[in-house]
Image (tube, grey):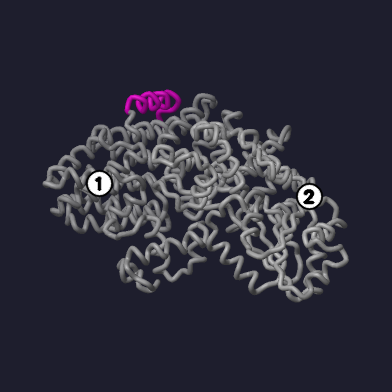
Amino acid sequence: MLSRFIGRTKLLADLHDLLADHRLVTLTGAGGAGKTRLAREIAGTVFVELATISRPDMLLRGVAEVLEVEDSAVPDHLADRKTVLVLDNCEHLKDAAADLAQRLLHSAPGLTILTTSRERLGVPGERVLVVPPLDVPPADAPMSTAYESVALLADRAPSWQLTPQNWPDVVKLLHRVAGLPLAIELAAVRLRAMPLTEVVKRLDDEMKLLTRNDRVALPHHKTLRAVMDWSHDLCTPEEQRLWAQASVFAGGWDLSAAEAVSDSDTVLDDLDGLVAKSIVTFEHDRYHLLEPLRQYGADRLGDDRAAVLKRHLDHYGELVRHVSAGWITDTALVGLLRVEMANVEAALETSLGEPGRALELEFQLARMHGAFFASGWPEQYRRLRRALEGGARDHWHLEALTFSASLALTLGRPDEAAELLAEAEQLNGEFAGVFYARGERQWLLDGDYTALATMREARARFEPERQVIFSVHIAMASALLAEEPEVRADIADLAATAEGNEIAVGGLLMAQGVAQLRFGSPDDAADLLRSALARQRDSGDQWGPVWAVEALAWATAASGQARRAARLLGAAEAAQRLTGRPLASHETFRQMRAEAVARARDPEYRREHAAGVGLRSFDEIFAVALGEDTVPLTPAQLEVAKLVAEGLTNREIAARLHKSQRTVETQVQQIFAALGIKKRVMIAARLNLS
């Protein structure tokens, strides 16, 4: 081979093991995933390329030509030899390849056959090994050539150099081509004559951009589009249509969604066909299209696009309504929303063509705190304001106005909050949301005790299923503003309705922690606040932790742990930065923070505070707040370590975290090295996990 084989160490070992134990092995995977290249790494093979053979009756002739014998002599030639015969690119001749494989295996006891195909041959005794895309660095990963996709790009573009400055663009490029080796190699060709920034900029037009001028390459490998065309021609018309329709999905989909967007009554059969041909992947009850394949399908959708997008909007709009109506009493619905959030946001973009509908859906999403599980506070606010521009002045407009006023206040934009509240008051000054926005303003901006009465009045005007969330806010405001008997009463009101709602329970523990800080022991307060943070991490809440980390810093300072408090004060600022939610404009918080900063002053204050401010993710913030930052593991490794401590296997951990098993195996080995241990059972003891 002229080019160097990169990575795939474990995959190649698995292939060797399969070939040692089985006589027919098939490599499957998406077009451009590297099946042929992997097969060529098996030493001593007889390699037969079938892509240039168009007729089933010419298949034996192709094998004979490679063996340099007559067609009829092929079985006898192989009979007394120990041979590995590779039949490459069998998909368009699958039935003929299956028949030939059975004949040759029967007549040649020493023969092993390795095939590459978009789908298995279906021969008895066949073993299948899926060739996935190369591993791609996460968006926030430090620069490293340990990732196979990075190593391949660097190897195939020898005149180009990886640097810290171009690393972000490298990550973007590799994500854009979904780790497909063929696409990476085609991109590397462009790096010979085009700056990396320009390649990334023009990747939206990658089907035209990534042209390969390799004279010895087979015709269907000359361009990425040719690879896609090759796969498309193998599909039935019904499969081709579903491939195009599935391109409207973002982040995967389930069977019910596929049936909703398609106008076919054979969706399941068509999906099975696309999975068998390695066009669509199926994992954890969800279907996926790699991004290059999705783009190709989108190009094929044509005039049907508007109708398919409308069906997509209808399906996910109904999902939003369903979750919004029941999430408070059935918190499992929140998990469903998180899984489908990318599709929901895509549907919301479509809904902008129907302004009234867009406003309803944006508010339905906002009122279930969708912003805390998805794109964040500033984005939720931006989308609500955008939807308000086109919506009719109806009930949904009023709901969205008051929620937007609350978000503006939360985001430190009091003037915008005042304008939105004034507009809502003109529409209906007695509306519950108007009352609540007034009370919130009194509490946060003025630190005014009378805000509690206004907020309680608002809660009473809301429907029962929404009252529990407002009870969380009231309990927190009360814990900061009221005297002890009143605080205890508000906390008891929340406790009576919080059971079964993880977000409400986290809020309850948080309010109890603040109350304990004011009226009890700072150490007990810190314990309650850490319990709240653990709940908030488990539920995916990014609303509560902004308060809870700040309050934990106050409690830690009050207990005399100055250095720890300094780091937590910095971590609280990091949480505010990540959510776009500054607390500095809130009167009550200013007072409490000033006291905590004064108590946390220490010769190491500046260094510890800077370490907290520099945290880059909620995983890191939670680790500091929960005392896990003293463990010599990254947040991702710690997550795996906890699951190992629970007794899960690598395969089970991979399924739980939606990672490849190989990635989990690597992380477990890294954990062993970091902790200085050799057995899984020692992890729990080393990290004090149960």
Res. 541 mark: none
Res. 52 mark: 2
Q: How many marks?
A: 2
Tell me whether the residue at label 2 lies in contact with that at label 1, contact meaning CB atoms closer than 8 angstroms: no
Side (left or right) of 510 relative to 339: left
Amino acid type of the residue that numbered disc 1 sits on in the rendered structure? Ala
Label 2, label 1: how many angstroms apart (C-alpha)? 60 Å
Of residues 486 and 526, which is closer to you in this image? Answer: 526
Q: Residue at x 50, y 35 (%)?
A: 196
- Stretch in magenta: 414-430
The local secondary structure at tag 2 comes to: loop
Is residue 272 in view? no
Circle nearer the N terminus (2, 1): 2
- Disc 2 versus disc 1: nearer the observer: 2
Give percent across and percent down for residue 673: 35, 65
Residue 135 belongs to the span the image colors magenta: no
Of residues 642 and 455, which is closer to you in this image? Answer: 642
Which of the 4 image quarters holds residue 183? top right
Magenta segment main secondary structure: helix
Q: Quadrant of the C terminus?
A: bottom left
Residue picked out by circle 1: 611
Is residue 56 in view? yes
